[in-house]
Image: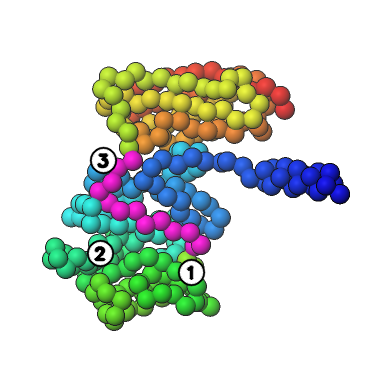
Amino acid sequence: MKSTLTLCFIGLTFLAKAQIELIYESPAHSGPVLVSDNNVKNAVVDFNTHPTEFNIYNLDNSLFRTCQLPTGVEATGSWWVSYPTLTLFDCDSTNLEYILVRPGNQSQSIEPHTRVVREDGTVLLDIPGCTFSGASNSPTAGSGGGLYNDGNSAVMFVLEGIHYFHPSRYYRLCGAAPAMYSASQGGITGVESIEEGAKTGMMLFPNPTATSIRIKYELPAGATNGILRVFDLQGRMIKEWNVTHQFDHIVFDVSNLESGNYIAHLLLNNGTKVSEKFVKIGN
C-alpha cells in the first residue's frame, strides 16, 4: 500500500507541473491588464521618464499602445492610472480609454479629481472633487468607489469627496468590467537607464532554435524607439514589432516557421540599422 501511494503522489506531482507554464516575466512597477476579452497586456506607468504618457505592452515586450495624459496635466506622485481597456468606457474597440485619478489629501490641501480619458488625451468624463479608488467585480461592490458588473453592463461609482461616508455618484458604462485591473501610481519608475554611448546591437539565442528565440537588443543614446522585423531569405516579412527602451528583448515563437534561415532587422528612430541572422530547425 505504501508503494502504491508513493507512485500516485509522484504521478499527481508530475501532472501539476505539466499544467503550469511560465509565459512572461514583467519588469518592476508594472501590472497585468485586460484590454479586451482574454487579451492580457502589461501596463507600465513611468511618469518620471514620460510625465505626459504611459505605455502598454504585449506579452512579447512589443509596444501595444502609448496613452497620452490630458492637455495641461503633468503626472506627479499624486496621480493614478486604472483600467486601461478597449471596450469598457465606449463601444468603439479601436480606441483605448483609462481612468486617471488624483486622490484627495486634506493635510496637503489636495482636492480629489477623477477623469475618464481616451488614449489620445481626450477627456470623456471629468469629475472634479470626486474619488475613484479600487475596484470590485461583484454585484455588491464595496463603498470605496470602483467598478462592478450588473445584468446590463459595468457601473462605475465615485465618492463625492475622499471618505467612504461621503455621497456617491454612479455612472453606467458601455462595456463590462474585466476580471483584472491595474492601478499604478505616478511618480514611480521601472526604466533602467541606458549607459551613454552604448552600442546598438542584437543577440539572438538560442540559435539555431526549434521553438522560440529571444531577440535581445540595445538602444543607444538618442534612440527611444524602433521597429523590429523578421524576414525570410526571399525578403518576405514574417513578423513586425514596435519596440522602446522600456525592454531589451522580444520573445518570438518560431515553432510554426519552416526550417531555414531568417533575418532579424532593427531600425531605430535615430536612423540606426542592425541585422542578425538566425536558423530555424525542425518542424
- Horizontal side of residue 245 vs 148, given as left or right: left
Q: Main secondary structure of the magenta part?
A: loop
Instruction: Please give the label number shown on residue 137.
Output: 1
Instruction: Please give the label number shown on residue 103.
Output: 2
Near mark 2 (Cα within 10 A), the count class, few <14, some 14-19 or many ≥20, is: many
Q: CA distance from mark 3 to mark 1?
A: 33 Å
Which amino acid type is marked by label 2?
Pro
Instruction: Please give the label number shown on residue 49.
Output: 3
Say above or below: 247 vs 160: above
Residue 216 horizontal/vertical position (percent): 46, 26
Bounds of the magenta segment: 178-190
Q: Nearer the viewer, mark 3 or mark 1?
A: 1
Near mark 1 (Cα within 10 A), the count class, few <14, some 14-19 or many ≥20, is: some
Front one among 44 and 236: 44
The number of numbered badges drawn on the structure is 3
Residue 59 horizontal/vertical position (percent): 50, 42
Magenta span contains residue 133: no
Q: Name the residue at 39% across, 47% down.
A: 30
Q: CA distance from mark 3 to mark 2?
A: 22 Å
Q: Name the residue at 52% across, 28% down.
A: 214
2 or 1: tag closer to the N-terminus: 2
Does the rendering let one see residue 103? yes
Front one among 230 and 220: 220
Q: Quadrant of residue 221?
A: top left
Quarter of the image with the C terminus is: top right
Which amino acid type is marked by label 3?
Thr
Magenta span contains residue 182: yes
